[in-house]
Image (spheres, grey):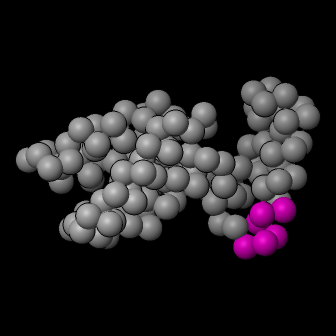
Amino acid sequence: MNKEVLDYVVEKTHELINAPSCSKEAKTAAQNWLDAIGTEGEAVETKKFMDELKADVVPIDMLIGFAESDDGIRIFGADTAKNIAGHAKKIKSAGAIYCDCPACAAATAILEKKDVISG
């Protein structure tokens, strides 16, 4: 992997780790990948990281459904859930396929480089 791509993915990985919406599992996979860069375990950790990101990126329709659900309202609160659903519908109408929260945005950016970093 060239240095420019590596630097970009490392930067996005730090953004992911620092995102309040990042899951504990994604933070762990991200840190494990960062720790494995340049080691014999890099390929294994890269695959684990990519698999975790694929599982964590939320499709926009799933976000809308969750935000409008009883569980979404209970977790976010009625006003926040309504705002999340409204925002998600707005970005969906503009062509968004996935959630654009900081964690999903960073994960999507990393996954766009998956073929390059997976070698």
Name the outermost residue toward the bottom: 95
- State whether residue 32 is above or below residue 90: above
**Who's the residue at 47% across and 38% down the image?**
17
- State whether residue 6 is above or below residue 80: below
- Residue 73 showing in the rendered view: yes
Place of residue 5 in the rendered image (x, y in percent of width and height, measured from the top left) = 33, 65
**Who's the residue at 24% across and 68% down the image?**
2
Q: Quadrant of residue 114?
A: bottom left
**Who's the residue at 78% across and 72% down the image?**
94
Place of residue 32 in the rendered image (x, y in percent of width and height, measured from the top left) = 28, 37
**What are the residue bounds of the magenta stretch?**
90-95
Name the outermost residue toward the left: 40
**Who's the residue at 81% across and 45% down the image?**
84
- State whether residue 32 is above or below residue 100: above
| 68 with respect to 34 (left or right) | right
| 70 with respect to 59 (left or right) | right
Secondary structure mostly seen in the magenta stretch: helix
Q: Nearer the viewer, residue 78 or 115?
A: 115
